[in-house]
Image (cartoon, rainbow, N blue to C red):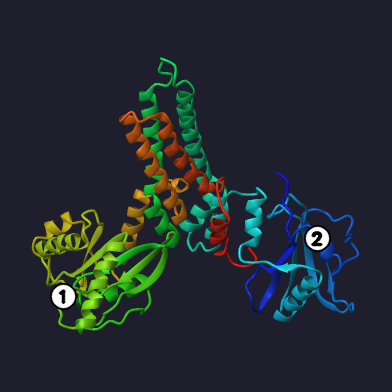
Amino acid sequence: METLEYETICALSTPVGLGAIAVIRISGSDTFSMVSKLFFSSSFQSDAIKDRYAYFGKIRNEKKHIIDEVLLTCFRAPHSYTGEDMAEISCHGSIFIVKKIMELLLDEGCVLAEAGAFTQRAFLNGKMDLTQAEAVMDLISSHSEASHRLAMDQMRGGYTKEIEQLRSELLHFSSMMELELDFGEEDVEFVDREELKKLLKKILDKTYTLKSSFSLGNVLKNGIPVAIVGNPNVGKSTLLNALLNEERAIVSHIPGTTRDTIEESMNIEGITFRFVDTAGLRHSDNFIENIGIERTYQAIGKAYVALYVFDIMQTTAKEVEAAIESFRLHISDQDKRFIVIANKLDELGETPPNFDRFVDLDTIFISAKRKENIGMITDRLVGYFKEHAPEMQMVTSNLRHYEALSEVEKALNIVKSGLEKNIPTDLITLDLNQALYHLGSITGQVTNEEILSNIFSRFCIGK
Protein backbone atom coordinates (compact mmCIF):
# COMPACT_ATOMS: atom_id res chain seq x y z
CA MET A 1 0.00 0.00 0.00
CA GLU A 2 1.26 3.46 -0.91
CA THR A 3 2.23 5.54 2.11
CA LEU A 4 0.21 8.74 2.51
CA GLU A 5 2.10 12.04 2.83
CA TYR A 6 1.71 14.06 6.01
CA GLU A 7 3.73 16.71 7.79
CA THR A 8 6.52 15.39 9.98
CA ILE A 9 5.51 15.10 13.63
CA CYS A 10 7.35 14.61 16.90
CA ALA A 11 6.44 13.87 20.51
CA LEU A 12 7.81 12.60 23.78
CA SER A 13 6.69 8.95 23.97
CA THR A 14 7.76 8.27 27.53
CA PRO A 15 6.03 9.83 30.58
CA VAL A 16 6.80 13.45 31.37
CA GLY A 17 9.11 13.90 34.35
CA LEU A 18 12.47 12.78 35.64
CA GLY A 19 13.66 9.35 34.58
CA ALA A 20 16.71 7.41 33.51
CA ILE A 21 15.89 7.83 29.82
CA ALA A 22 13.33 9.55 27.63
CA VAL A 23 12.28 8.56 24.11
CA ILE A 24 11.37 11.19 21.52
CA ARG A 25 9.61 9.87 18.43
CA ILE A 26 9.63 11.49 14.97
CA SER A 27 7.61 10.37 11.95
CA GLY A 28 7.16 11.72 8.43
CA SER A 29 8.90 12.09 5.09
CA ASP A 30 11.35 14.71 6.41
CA THR A 31 12.36 12.70 9.48
CA PHE A 32 15.89 11.80 8.42
CA SER A 33 16.75 15.20 6.97
CA MET A 34 15.63 16.86 10.20
CA VAL A 35 17.50 14.57 12.62
CA SER A 36 20.66 14.71 10.50
CA LYS A 37 20.91 18.45 11.28
CA LEU A 38 20.87 17.76 15.02
CA PHE A 39 22.56 14.38 15.40
CA PHE A 40 26.29 13.89 14.94
CA SER A 41 28.14 10.58 14.86
CA SER A 42 31.11 9.22 12.93
CA SER A 43 29.04 6.17 11.90
CA PHE A 44 25.98 8.16 10.82
CA GLN A 45 25.65 9.11 7.15
CA SER A 46 22.48 11.00 6.26
CA ASP A 47 22.50 9.67 2.70
CA ALA A 48 23.05 6.05 3.76
CA ILE A 49 20.93 5.50 6.86
CA LYS A 50 20.60 1.88 7.91
CA ASP A 51 17.12 0.60 8.51
CA ARG A 52 16.25 -0.49 12.07
CA TYR A 53 19.72 0.41 13.28
CA ALA A 54 20.72 2.28 16.45
CA TYR A 55 23.44 4.93 16.20
CA PHE A 56 25.31 6.36 19.17
CA GLY A 57 26.12 10.06 18.92
CA LYS A 58 25.49 13.59 20.17
CA ILE A 59 22.67 16.08 19.80
CA ARG A 60 24.02 19.61 19.19
CA ASN A 61 22.27 22.95 18.94
CA GLU A 62 22.82 25.60 16.27
CA LYS A 63 25.93 26.81 18.12
CA LYS A 64 27.35 23.28 18.11
CA HIS A 65 26.95 23.02 21.87
CA ILE A 66 26.33 19.42 22.99
CA ILE A 67 22.85 18.91 24.47
CA ASP A 68 23.19 15.19 25.21
CA GLU A 69 24.69 11.89 24.17
CA VAL A 70 21.89 9.78 22.72
CA LEU A 71 20.93 6.68 20.77
CA LEU A 72 19.20 7.34 17.44
CA THR A 73 17.20 4.44 16.01
CA CYS A 74 16.03 4.74 12.41
CA PHE A 75 13.13 2.97 10.68
CA ARG A 76 12.67 3.30 6.91
CA ALA A 77 9.19 3.30 5.38
CA PRO A 78 7.25 1.12 5.13
CA HIS A 79 9.02 -0.98 7.80
CA SER A 80 8.05 1.19 10.76
CA TYR A 81 5.20 1.53 13.23
CA THR A 82 3.53 4.31 11.24
CA GLY A 83 4.52 3.06 7.79
CA GLU A 84 6.52 6.28 7.30
CA ASP A 85 10.18 7.12 7.82
CA MET A 86 10.59 7.17 11.61
CA ALA A 87 13.27 7.85 14.18
CA GLU A 88 13.44 7.51 17.94
CA ILE A 89 15.90 9.51 20.04
CA SER A 90 16.73 7.88 23.38
CA CYS A 91 18.21 10.57 25.59
CA HIS A 92 18.72 11.08 29.31
CA GLY A 93 15.48 11.72 31.17
CA SER A 94 16.20 15.31 32.15
CA ILE A 95 13.23 17.63 31.62
CA PHE A 96 15.66 20.28 30.36
CA ILE A 97 17.27 17.91 27.81
CA VAL A 98 13.92 16.74 26.46
CA LYS A 99 12.71 20.32 26.16
CA LYS A 100 15.84 21.42 24.26
CA ILE A 101 15.72 18.49 21.79
CA MET A 102 12.01 19.08 21.14
CA GLU A 103 12.71 22.79 20.54
CA LEU A 104 15.45 21.91 18.02
CA LEU A 105 13.08 19.59 16.15
CA LEU A 106 10.36 22.23 16.07
CA ASP A 107 12.88 24.79 14.77
CA GLU A 108 13.60 22.39 11.88
CA GLY A 109 9.92 22.34 10.92
CA CYS A 110 8.62 19.43 12.95
CA VAL A 111 5.04 19.68 14.25
CA LEU A 112 3.96 18.56 17.71
CA ALA A 113 2.01 15.32 17.46
CA GLU A 114 -1.52 15.23 18.79
CA ALA A 115 -2.86 12.38 20.93
CA GLY A 116 -2.81 9.09 19.02
CA ALA A 117 -1.23 10.64 15.92
CA PHE A 118 1.36 7.88 15.40
CA THR A 119 -1.16 5.06 15.70
CA GLN A 120 -3.63 6.95 13.51
CA ARG A 121 -0.99 7.16 10.78
CA ALA A 122 -0.33 3.44 11.20
CA PHE A 123 -4.04 2.82 10.54
CA LEU A 124 -4.26 5.25 7.61
CA ASN A 125 -1.12 3.72 6.05
CA GLY A 126 -2.53 0.21 6.29
CA LYS A 127 -0.20 -1.06 9.03
CA MET A 128 -3.17 -2.13 11.15
CA ASP A 129 -6.96 -2.03 11.06
CA LEU A 130 -9.13 -0.04 13.44
CA THR A 131 -9.71 -2.86 15.94
CA GLN A 132 -5.95 -3.43 16.16
CA ALA A 133 -5.35 0.30 16.62
CA GLU A 134 -7.84 0.42 19.49
CA ALA A 135 -6.20 -2.67 21.00
CA VAL A 136 -2.94 -0.72 21.22
CA MET A 137 -4.54 1.61 23.76
CA ASP A 138 -6.03 -1.36 25.61
CA LEU A 139 -2.57 -2.94 25.74
CA ILE A 140 -1.01 0.23 27.19
CA SER A 141 -3.70 0.42 29.89
CA SER A 142 -3.84 -3.33 30.63
CA HIS A 143 -3.46 -4.00 34.36
CA SER A 144 -3.68 -7.79 34.54
CA GLU A 145 -2.69 -10.92 32.65
CA ALA A 146 -6.28 -11.35 31.44
CA SER A 147 -6.64 -7.79 30.07
CA HIS A 148 -3.12 -7.99 28.58
CA ARG A 149 -3.89 -11.27 26.84
CA LEU A 150 -7.17 -9.95 25.50
CA ALA A 151 -5.47 -6.83 24.10
CA MET A 152 -2.62 -8.87 22.57
CA ASP A 153 -5.03 -11.26 20.86
CA GLN A 154 -6.94 -8.34 19.39
CA MET A 155 -3.80 -6.44 18.39
CA ARG A 156 -2.57 -9.54 16.57
CA GLY A 157 -5.81 -9.65 14.60
CA GLY A 158 -7.74 -12.36 16.48
CA TYR A 159 -10.89 -10.26 16.77
CA THR A 160 -10.47 -8.90 13.25
CA LYS A 161 -10.51 -12.44 11.82
CA GLU A 162 -13.86 -13.08 13.50
CA ILE A 163 -15.33 -9.87 12.07
CA GLU A 164 -13.86 -10.49 8.61
CA GLN A 165 -15.26 -14.02 8.54
CA LEU A 166 -18.65 -12.68 9.56
CA ARG A 167 -18.49 -9.99 6.89
CA SER A 168 -17.34 -12.50 4.26
CA GLU A 169 -20.34 -14.73 4.97
CA LEU A 170 -22.64 -11.72 4.90
CA LEU A 171 -21.17 -10.64 1.55
CA HIS A 172 -21.87 -14.13 0.24
CA PHE A 173 -25.43 -13.79 1.50
CA SER A 174 -25.70 -10.37 -0.18
CA SER A 175 -24.33 -11.69 -3.49
CA MET A 176 -26.97 -14.43 -3.50
CA MET A 177 -29.64 -11.79 -2.99
CA GLU A 178 -28.19 -9.74 -5.83
CA LEU A 179 -28.44 -12.82 -8.03
CA GLU A 180 -32.12 -13.00 -7.21
CA LEU A 181 -32.46 -9.41 -8.39
CA ASP A 182 -30.56 -10.15 -11.60
CA PHE A 183 -32.79 -13.10 -12.38
CA GLY A 184 -35.96 -11.66 -10.86
CA GLU A 185 -37.82 -11.68 -14.18
CA GLU A 186 -37.09 -15.37 -14.77
CA ASP A 187 -39.82 -17.84 -13.91
CA VAL A 188 -37.27 -19.80 -11.87
CA GLU A 189 -36.21 -19.62 -8.20
CA PHE A 190 -32.49 -19.07 -8.69
CA VAL A 191 -31.64 -18.97 -5.00
CA ASP A 192 -33.13 -21.43 -2.51
CA ARG A 193 -34.83 -19.31 0.18
CA GLU A 194 -34.45 -22.02 2.80
CA GLU A 195 -30.69 -22.05 2.23
CA LEU A 196 -30.68 -18.29 2.57
CA LYS A 197 -32.52 -18.58 5.89
CA LYS A 198 -30.02 -21.16 7.17
CA LEU A 199 -27.09 -18.92 6.19
CA LEU A 200 -28.75 -15.93 7.83
CA LYS A 201 -29.32 -17.89 11.05
CA LYS A 202 -25.64 -18.87 11.11
CA ILE A 203 -24.58 -15.22 10.69
CA LEU A 204 -27.07 -14.04 13.32
CA ASP A 205 -25.80 -16.65 15.79
CA LYS A 206 -22.21 -15.49 15.31
CA THR A 207 -23.23 -11.85 15.68
CA TYR A 208 -25.13 -12.64 18.88
CA THR A 209 -22.16 -14.57 20.31
CA LEU A 210 -19.78 -11.65 19.73
CA LYS A 211 -22.30 -9.10 21.02
CA SER A 212 -23.23 -11.07 24.15
CA SER A 213 -19.55 -11.48 25.09
CA PHE A 214 -19.29 -7.74 25.77
CA SER A 215 -20.25 -8.04 29.44
CA LEU A 216 -17.32 -10.40 29.96
CA GLY A 217 -14.96 -8.42 27.74
CA ASN A 218 -15.75 -5.25 29.63
CA VAL A 219 -14.93 -6.78 33.02
CA LEU A 220 -11.79 -8.40 31.61
CA LYS A 221 -10.57 -5.00 30.50
CA ASN A 222 -11.69 -2.98 33.52
CA GLY A 223 -11.64 -5.59 36.29
CA ILE A 224 -14.34 -7.95 37.52
CA PRO A 225 -16.69 -6.19 39.97
CA VAL A 226 -17.42 -8.19 43.13
CA ALA A 227 -19.92 -6.74 45.62
CA ILE A 228 -19.54 -7.60 49.32
CA VAL A 229 -23.05 -7.45 50.81
CA GLY A 230 -24.90 -8.38 53.99
CA ASN A 231 -26.44 -6.98 57.15
CA PRO A 232 -24.59 -4.51 59.41
CA ASN A 233 -21.82 -5.89 61.64
CA VAL A 234 -21.42 -9.24 59.88
CA GLY A 235 -17.78 -8.49 58.97
CA LYS A 236 -17.99 -7.15 55.40
CA SER A 237 -15.33 -4.48 55.94
CA THR A 238 -13.16 -6.95 57.87
CA LEU A 239 -13.45 -9.34 54.94
CA LEU A 240 -12.43 -6.60 52.47
CA ASN A 241 -9.36 -5.86 54.61
CA ALA A 242 -8.55 -9.59 54.79
CA LEU A 243 -8.84 -9.98 51.02
CA LEU A 244 -6.59 -6.98 50.39
CA ASN A 245 -4.33 -7.85 53.31
CA GLU A 246 -4.43 -4.24 54.47
CA GLU A 247 -6.59 -2.00 56.66
CA ARG A 248 -8.54 -0.32 53.87
CA ALA A 249 -12.04 -0.12 55.38
CA ILE A 250 -13.02 1.19 58.83
CA VAL A 251 -14.06 -1.66 61.12
CA SER A 252 -16.43 -0.91 64.01
CA HIS A 253 -19.06 -2.65 66.12
CA ILE A 254 -21.35 0.35 65.52
CA PRO A 255 -24.02 -0.47 62.89
CA GLY A 256 -24.01 1.74 59.79
CA THR A 257 -20.30 2.59 59.88
CA THR A 258 -20.02 2.00 56.11
CA ARG A 259 -22.38 4.49 54.49
CA ASP A 260 -20.97 4.48 50.98
CA THR A 261 -19.35 1.92 48.74
CA ILE A 262 -15.59 1.42 49.09
CA GLU A 263 -13.83 -0.03 46.04
CA GLU A 264 -10.39 -1.61 45.82
CA SER A 265 -8.76 -3.78 43.15
CA MET A 266 -6.78 -6.96 43.60
CA ASN A 267 -4.96 -9.13 41.07
CA ILE A 268 -5.57 -12.85 41.61
CA GLU A 269 -3.89 -15.34 39.28
CA GLY A 270 -3.61 -12.76 36.52
CA ILE A 271 -7.22 -11.57 36.83
CA THR A 272 -8.18 -8.19 38.30
CA PHE A 273 -11.11 -8.24 40.72
CA ARG A 274 -12.71 -4.99 41.92
CA PHE A 275 -14.06 -5.61 45.41
CA VAL A 276 -16.81 -3.23 46.50
CA ASP A 277 -17.58 -3.03 50.23
CA THR A 278 -21.17 -1.86 50.65
CA ALA A 279 -23.38 -0.40 53.35
CA GLY A 280 -25.09 -2.87 55.66
CA LEU A 281 -28.67 -3.67 54.65
CA ARG A 282 -31.19 -2.76 57.34
CA HIS A 283 -34.12 -0.43 57.91
CA SER A 284 -32.86 3.01 58.89
CA ASP A 285 -34.30 6.46 59.44
CA ASN A 286 -30.94 8.03 58.62
CA PHE A 287 -31.15 9.72 55.21
CA ILE A 288 -27.41 9.36 54.47
CA GLU A 289 -27.36 5.70 55.48
CA ASN A 290 -30.36 4.98 53.25
CA ILE A 291 -28.51 6.47 50.28
CA GLY A 292 -25.66 4.07 51.06
CA ILE A 293 -28.11 1.15 51.17
CA GLU A 294 -29.55 2.14 47.80
CA ARG A 295 -26.01 2.19 46.40
CA THR A 296 -25.55 -1.30 47.79
CA TYR A 297 -28.36 -2.57 45.56
CA GLN A 298 -26.84 -0.71 42.63
CA ALA A 299 -23.48 -2.37 43.34
CA ILE A 300 -25.13 -5.80 43.41
CA GLY A 301 -26.80 -5.08 40.09
CA LYS A 302 -23.51 -4.08 38.46
CA ALA A 303 -21.43 -6.87 40.03
CA TYR A 304 -20.32 -9.93 38.12
CA VAL A 305 -20.73 -11.86 41.39
CA ALA A 306 -21.79 -10.89 44.93
CA LEU A 307 -20.32 -12.18 48.17
CA TYR A 308 -23.19 -12.52 50.65
CA VAL A 309 -21.65 -12.37 54.14
CA PHE A 310 -23.59 -13.33 57.28
CA ASP A 311 -22.87 -13.95 60.96
CA ILE A 312 -22.90 -17.72 61.49
CA MET A 313 -23.79 -17.18 65.16
CA GLN A 314 -26.98 -15.23 64.44
CA THR A 315 -28.27 -16.40 61.06
CA THR A 316 -30.13 -19.51 59.93
CA ALA A 317 -29.90 -21.13 56.53
CA LYS A 318 -33.54 -20.19 55.92
CA GLU A 319 -32.74 -16.53 56.55
CA VAL A 320 -29.80 -16.71 54.12
CA GLU A 321 -32.00 -18.15 51.38
CA ALA A 322 -34.64 -15.49 52.01
CA ALA A 323 -32.06 -12.69 51.90
CA ILE A 324 -30.63 -13.84 48.55
CA GLU A 325 -34.12 -14.18 47.10
CA SER A 326 -34.87 -10.64 48.30
CA PHE A 327 -31.72 -9.38 46.57
CA ARG A 328 -32.78 -10.97 43.30
CA LEU A 329 -36.21 -9.39 43.47
CA HIS A 330 -34.83 -5.98 44.40
CA ILE A 331 -32.36 -5.89 41.50
CA SER A 332 -34.67 -7.71 39.02
CA ASP A 333 -31.97 -10.23 38.16
CA GLN A 334 -32.84 -13.84 38.83
CA ASP A 335 -29.49 -15.04 37.46
CA LYS A 336 -27.21 -12.93 39.66
CA ARG A 337 -24.37 -15.04 41.04
CA PHE A 338 -23.98 -15.16 44.81
CA ILE A 339 -21.23 -16.78 46.88
CA VAL A 340 -22.52 -17.48 50.39
CA ILE A 341 -19.99 -16.74 53.14
CA ALA A 342 -20.50 -17.63 56.81
CA ASN A 343 -18.29 -15.35 58.89
CA LYS A 344 -17.13 -15.37 62.55
CA LEU A 345 -16.08 -19.01 62.51
CA ASP A 346 -13.75 -18.14 65.40
CA GLU A 347 -16.79 -17.51 67.62
CA LEU A 348 -18.53 -20.78 66.71
CA GLY A 349 -18.40 -23.31 69.54
CA GLU A 350 -20.30 -26.13 67.85
CA THR A 351 -21.78 -27.18 64.54
CA PRO A 352 -24.60 -24.76 63.64
CA PRO A 353 -28.19 -26.01 63.34
CA ASN A 354 -29.25 -27.16 59.85
CA PHE A 355 -25.59 -27.44 58.83
CA ASP A 356 -26.58 -29.60 55.83
CA ARG A 357 -28.61 -26.73 54.40
CA PHE A 358 -25.57 -24.46 54.60
CA VAL A 359 -23.61 -27.11 52.70
CA ASP A 360 -26.33 -27.25 50.05
CA LEU A 361 -25.82 -23.50 49.56
CA ASP A 362 -22.06 -24.10 48.90
CA THR A 363 -21.33 -21.95 51.93
CA ILE A 364 -17.72 -20.96 52.62
CA PHE A 365 -17.00 -20.82 56.36
CA ILE A 366 -14.44 -18.16 57.31
CA SER A 367 -13.08 -16.01 60.06
CA ALA A 368 -12.37 -12.65 58.47
CA LYS A 369 -10.89 -11.46 61.76
CA ARG A 370 -8.29 -14.28 61.78
CA LYS A 371 -8.07 -14.40 57.96
CA GLU A 372 -9.04 -18.07 57.99
CA ASN A 373 -10.20 -19.70 54.72
CA ILE A 374 -9.96 -16.42 52.78
CA GLY A 375 -8.15 -18.35 50.06
CA MET A 376 -11.29 -20.45 49.55
CA ILE A 377 -13.12 -17.30 48.46
CA THR A 378 -10.47 -16.23 45.95
CA ASP A 379 -10.21 -19.80 44.64
CA ARG A 380 -13.97 -19.88 44.13
CA LEU A 381 -13.91 -16.53 42.31
CA VAL A 382 -11.07 -17.53 39.99
CA GLY A 383 -12.50 -20.98 39.37
CA TYR A 384 -15.94 -19.65 38.60
CA PHE A 385 -14.57 -17.04 36.21
CA LYS A 386 -12.33 -19.48 34.32
CA GLU A 387 -15.17 -21.98 34.05
CA HIS A 388 -17.43 -19.44 32.36
CA ALA A 389 -14.86 -17.49 30.31
CA PRO A 390 -14.87 -18.22 26.56
CA GLU A 391 -11.83 -18.06 24.29
CA MET A 392 -10.20 -14.64 24.57
CA GLN A 393 -10.14 -13.87 20.83
CA MET A 394 -13.95 -14.26 20.73
CA VAL A 395 -14.55 -11.54 23.32
CA THR A 396 -15.93 -8.09 22.51
CA SER A 397 -14.41 -5.61 24.93
CA ASN A 398 -14.94 -2.31 23.11
CA LEU A 399 -18.18 -0.34 23.50
CA ARG A 400 -17.96 0.96 19.92
CA HIS A 401 -17.77 -2.61 18.62
CA TYR A 402 -20.70 -3.64 20.81
CA GLU A 403 -22.84 -0.79 19.48
CA ALA A 404 -21.94 -1.66 15.87
CA LEU A 405 -22.76 -5.34 16.44
CA SER A 406 -26.11 -4.28 17.93
CA GLU A 407 -26.86 -2.40 14.71
CA VAL A 408 -25.78 -5.42 12.66
CA GLU A 409 -28.07 -7.67 14.68
CA LYS A 410 -30.96 -5.23 14.29
CA ALA A 411 -30.52 -5.05 10.50
CA LEU A 412 -30.19 -8.83 10.15
CA ASN A 413 -33.37 -9.43 12.16
CA ILE A 414 -35.20 -7.14 9.74
CA VAL A 415 -33.75 -9.20 6.87
CA LYS A 416 -34.90 -12.39 8.59
CA SER A 417 -38.40 -11.00 8.97
CA GLY A 418 -38.36 -9.91 5.33
CA LEU A 419 -37.44 -13.39 4.14
CA GLU A 420 -40.21 -14.94 6.23
CA LYS A 421 -42.78 -12.48 4.85
CA ASN A 422 -41.48 -12.74 1.24
CA ILE A 423 -40.74 -9.02 1.08
CA PRO A 424 -39.26 -7.97 -2.29
CA THR A 425 -35.56 -8.75 -2.60
CA ASP A 426 -34.54 -5.17 -3.42
CA LEU A 427 -35.90 -4.02 -0.05
CA ILE A 428 -34.11 -6.82 1.81
CA THR A 429 -30.78 -5.85 0.23
CA LEU A 430 -31.09 -2.35 1.75
CA ASP A 431 -30.99 -3.82 5.26
CA LEU A 432 -28.22 -6.20 4.21
CA ASN A 433 -26.14 -3.22 3.15
CA GLN A 434 -26.80 -1.60 6.53
CA ALA A 435 -25.45 -4.69 8.28
CA LEU A 436 -22.38 -4.71 6.01
CA TYR A 437 -21.81 -1.02 6.71
CA HIS A 438 -21.80 -1.48 10.48
CA LEU A 439 -19.51 -4.52 10.28
CA GLY A 440 -17.11 -2.54 8.11
CA SER A 441 -17.13 0.29 10.63
CA ILE A 442 -15.66 -2.02 13.28
CA THR A 443 -12.46 -2.77 11.37
CA GLY A 444 -12.28 0.61 9.62
CA GLN A 445 -13.24 -0.55 6.14
CA VAL A 446 -16.00 2.03 6.48
CA THR A 447 -15.21 5.09 8.58
CA ASN A 448 -15.31 8.88 8.79
CA GLU A 449 -13.26 11.68 10.28
CA GLU A 450 -15.51 12.03 13.34
CA ILE A 451 -15.08 8.36 14.30
CA LEU A 452 -11.30 8.53 13.87
CA SER A 453 -11.00 11.73 15.89
CA ASN A 454 -13.06 10.23 18.70
CA ILE A 455 -10.97 7.05 18.82
CA PHE A 456 -7.47 8.46 18.59
CA SER A 457 -8.08 11.47 20.84
CA ARG A 458 -8.22 8.98 23.74
CA PHE A 459 -4.64 7.87 23.13
CA CYS A 460 -1.69 9.31 24.99
CA ILE A 461 0.55 11.76 23.13
CA GLY A 462 3.52 9.93 21.63
CA LYS A 463 1.50 6.88 20.68
Q: Could you tell me if residue 205 is visible in this image?
A: no
Residue 148 vs residue 3: left or right?
left
- Mark 1 touches mark 2? (CB < 8 Å): no
Q: Is residue 344 above or below residue 203?
A: below
Q: Which of 291 and 314 is in front in this view?
A: 291
Tell us which disc is closer to us: 1 or 2.
2
Residue 55 vs residue 209: left or right?
right
* Residue occupying image coordinates x 16% and y 54%: 360
Q: Nearer the viewer, residue 170 or 132?
A: 170
Residue farthest along the front direction in this orientation: 185
Q: In this view, does 37 lie above or below 337?
A: below
* Residue occupying image coordinates x 15% and y 80%: 284
Q: Which of 165 and 431 is in front in this view?
A: 431
Residue 282, numbered circle = 1
Residue 385 vs residue 122: left or right?
left
Amino acid type shown at disc 2 = Asp
* Residue occupying image coordinates x 45% and y 54%: 397
Which quadrant of the figure has residue 223? bottom left
Which quadrant of the figure has residue 277? bottom left
Task: Residue 47 in the image: state x and y as whole percent.
Answer: 89, 56
User: Quadrant where the N terminus lies?
Assistant: top right
Pointer 2 residue: 30
Task: Residue 438 in the image: state x and y as whole percent.
Answer: 47, 46
Instruction: Mark 1 or mark 2: name the one nearer the start of the chain.
Output: 2
